[in-house]
Amino acid sequence: MATPHLYAPITGNPPDGSTPAAHQIPQVPTKSGPMEFIMAHQQMVAAAVVVVFVLMYMMNQKPKKMAAAGGVCKADEDCASGACAVGNARAAHSNKTCCQSPNTARHLFRNYCADLPVGAACRNNDMCASGKCHGNWFGITTGKCK
């Protein structure tokens, strides 16, 4: 004899009281393709696009041309030698040039090219390749590298 049901039978269950079928969730058909992927992963795709554009920009940049010794400069990064300073003691203080070597000498709050050859105008011994600045009166006047 069948047992009486207290509740109305669930759709899909057999009315005779036997084991009910598992409740099934209807499947929504899904589409797959590039646009569905993009829409599902918008932030990741946007980040990848930005990275690609940055890389393309960086690859198209031309390297900065460095000035040779004696060339006009404003900073050390402008020179192939890595040193931008006043060329010698007779040069105008506002005229900076690329030095022959990466060495500079400081005198009265200004950087001067160091390793200057014999006969170049100097203010102190550090400016000369020989280490001797003759006739500079302890940096008060301009001397010559000996």
Image (cartoon, rainbow, N blue to C red):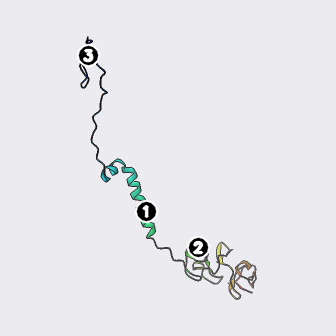
Residue hosting label 2: 76
Residue drawn at x 55%, y 75% is 78
* Among numbered discs 1 and 2, the one appearing first in the sequence: 1
Residue hosting label 3: 7
Name the amino acid type tagged 3. Tyr
Q: Residue 120 at x, y = what percent?
A: 68, 86
- For residue 54, the mark is 1
Q: Residue 102 at x, y = what percent?
A: 64, 76
Q: Residue 71 at x, y = what percent?
A: 56, 82
Nearest-to-viewer mark from 2 and 3: 3
Nearest-to-viewer mark from 1 and 2: 1
Marks 1 and 2, how far apart at CA: 27 Å
Position of residue 104 in the picture relative to residue 22 (left or right): right
Name the amino acid type tagged 1. Val
Asked whether 42 or 123 is in front, the reply is 42
Name the amino acid type tagged 2. Asp
Image: 80 above or below 10 = below
Residue drawn at x 40%, y 51% is 44
